[in-house]
Image (spheres, helix red, strand yellow):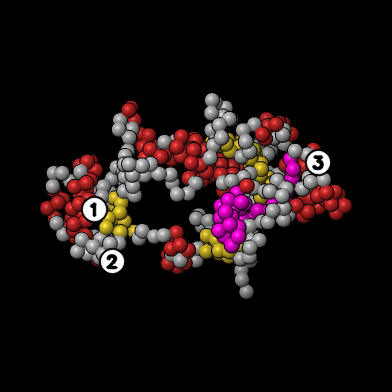
Amino acid sequence: MSEPKRSGPLSGMTVITLEHAIAAPFCTRQLADLGARVIKIERPGVGDFARAYDHRTRGLASHFVWTNRSKESLTLDLKQSAALEVLDELIAHADVLVQNLAPGAAARMGLSFETLHAKYPKLIVCDISGYGADGPYRDKKAYDLLIQSEAAFLSITGTPEEPSKAGNSIADIAAGMYAYTGILSALLQRGISGEGSHVEVSMLEALGEWMGFPMYYAYDGQQPPGRNGAAHATIYPYGPFKAGDGRVVMLGLQNEREWKLFCDIVLRRSELATDPRLDSNVRRVENRAVLKEVIEQGFASLTAPDVIARLDEAQIANAAVNQVGDLWIHPQLHARQRFRPIGSPAGELQALLPPATVNTFDARMDPVPALGEHSATILRELGRSDAAISKLQADGVI
């Protein structure tokens, strides 16, 4: 007999979210992970446009499955007054409202923090945008790649010949994470003051924070970090190196003690440790082309397992260069039992547990909702009769 689930710290709290794409859904999914009831408002017949990004997860969109489990879907056409009435009733009983609509859209519907705070002083309002609520860029459209470009992330990512975007939506993820932590902070603050707060997060400022190291590296007009493919821009050797069997090994050195061990045990060329071209990280970075040739010459007679064995002997950090599919079968994740089954409109799927494991409660791992799956249930909770719900459907309100 399985043990009963232990409720998370946000159990009993309600989050209303007017969200689409990634940043806000990623934020609110994590609130749901902690037990919050998350009611996702979607457009009738269409829903969150991320539902149509692809059909890779057994007919469902991969982005949507990732960021929307454990939520309830309520369809509302917010251009109709009857829908706004329903929304207001929901907000009146909610703890948090999250939105990442187009700039100004929420305010035009009477959903600005100032308006809502006057009516519902305990409500926490979180606004997520591309560039923020003011400033000359306020009304610019902001998609993940555009923010990666605007925040100079592309200038440090890729090869010397060509910049590259990150392979996943890091600007959205950054904004979603700061919104999530901001809301948790506001909930703590409400416990002290009794009042709700306004949480505002912009994608540019979130990714700008993640650019802190290269910004300081280039402080006062100094040369910024270069683009070095999968190698580290300012620490060397730290990156991919080819072994004699054609396979690639990823390795990383962090200090001079490790450099000496690398020369002694891995390369078996102790004299390199004191070579004046290579005897500090600054010099190794300056002479990375020379050192890369030395390392790959040393690896030429070895297979990748041979190289890894020497690296492990020297206690030098190393990793396999995995493909995405390898993550689903990663032995460490399975040894730690990190996958759980979740429901979805396409049947049972596998999902990773949230990264932070807390020993006093269980993460919520409930289904990904179908569009409008919970509309009737939620409306009945608000006191609507079946006849009234049928009329809302006939009028296109839900």
Residue 221 at least partly seen: yes
Mark 3 is surrounded, within 10 Å at the Cα level, by few (under 14), some (14 to 19) or many (20 or more) other residues, namely: some
Direction left: furthest residue = 271
Q: Mark 1 points at which residue?
A: 258
Quarter placement of the N terminus: bottom right
The amino acid type, in three-letter code, at marker 1 is Glu
Q: Which residue is drawn at 46% across and 34% down?
A: 150
- Give the residues drawn in magenta, as a range: 50-78
Residue 362 at least partly seen: no
Direction right: furthest residue = 387
The amino acid type, in three-letter code, at marker 2 is Pro
* Gap between marks 1 and 3 measured at Cα: 67 Å
Q: Residue at x 49, y 46 (%)?
A: 169
Say whether disc 2 or disc 3 marks the residue closer to the N-terminus. 3
At which x and y percent is residue 15? 66, 46
Q: Name the residue under label 2.
A: 305
Judging depth in this view, the residue of 239 and 254 nearest the camera is 239
